[in-house]
Image: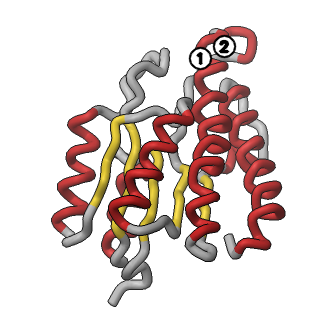
Amino acid sequence: MGRMDGKVALVTGAARGMGRAHAIRLAEEGANILAIDCPPDTGLPYPTGSADDLQITVKEVEALGRRIIAHEGDVRKQSSLDKLVADGVKAFGGLDVAVANAGIWTVHPFHDIPEDEFTAVLDVNITGVWRTLKAVSPAIKERGGGSIIVTSSGNGVEGSPHYAHYVASKHGVIGLAKSAALEFGQYGI
């Protein structure tokens, strides 16, 4: 028996990379998975997770004998996260764990960061985490407690040239997590 038998875990940014790895590891431990990724347009100069990437995650989770609900959605949209949580609670009976993993970055000297990229990085990396916590915390509270994990970075505790917007977002994630922990702790989260 795995440590997550009978549990349900939500993972943002689940189409590839760390998000896929989190979803697979949680499934290996017995959890059913709620996955979200594939924003339609981030305004970034590189492609984000695709629908095909998300389907690979689905197949890998299902190959482990676990169930998965995967939505093509955007952590910048509260409705995307709320719908995934609602669908997961309906299908699996609740939510126990959330991994706010979705994140993006670009590289530019400070004065050359395009405003749309600065905004996109903060919208996904910090506002997307806030929206995720906002979506999942009532369901985890209803379950009697659980875990919320947020992904920051070494850049969340130090500065770095050419990543000012990313660094700011990851510092913000740490502050958001600390504040949320103080409020959610009374509910076993």
Q: Is residue 12 above or below residue 77?
A: below
For the residue pair 18 and 108, the one nearer the viewer reads as: 18
Q: Which residue does the image show at 63% across and 58% down from the upper left? A: 137
The colour scheme is secondary structure
The amino acid beneath tag 1 is Glu
Q: Is residue 139 above or below residue 155?
A: below
Q: CA distance from mark 1 to mark 2?
A: 7 Å
Q: Is residue 122 above or below residue 145?
A: above
Q: Which residue does the image show at 83% across and 63% down from the upper left? A: 182
Badge 1 element: helix
Label 1 close to label 2 by CB (< 8 Å):
yes
For the residue pair 16 and 32, the one nearer the viewer reads as: 32
- Asked whether residue 25 appears in the rendered view, the answer is no
Q: Is residue 135 above or below residue 1?
A: above
Q: Which residue does the image show at 61% across and 27% down from the upper left? A: 121
Q: How many other residues sit within 10 Å of disc 1, few (<14), some (14-19) or many (≥20)?
A: many
Pointer 2: what residue? 113
Number of the label disc, if any, that sits on residue 138:
none
Q: Residue furthest bottom?
A: 1
Q: How many marks?
A: 2
Pointer 1: what residue? 117
Mark nearest the camera among 1 and 2 is: 1
Question: x%, y% of residue 58?
Answer: 24, 53
The amino acid beneath tag 2 is Ile
Question: x%, y% of residue 37?
Answer: 39, 39
Left or right side of 10 for 136: right
- Asked whether residue 79 appears in the rendered view, the answer is yes
Left or right side of 165 for 41: left
Q: Which image quarter is the C terminus in? A: bottom right
Q: How many other residues sit within 10 Å of disc 2, few (<14), some (14-19) or many (≥20)?
A: some
Q: Which image quarter is the N terminus in? A: bottom left
Question: x%, y% of residue 152?
Answer: 64, 49
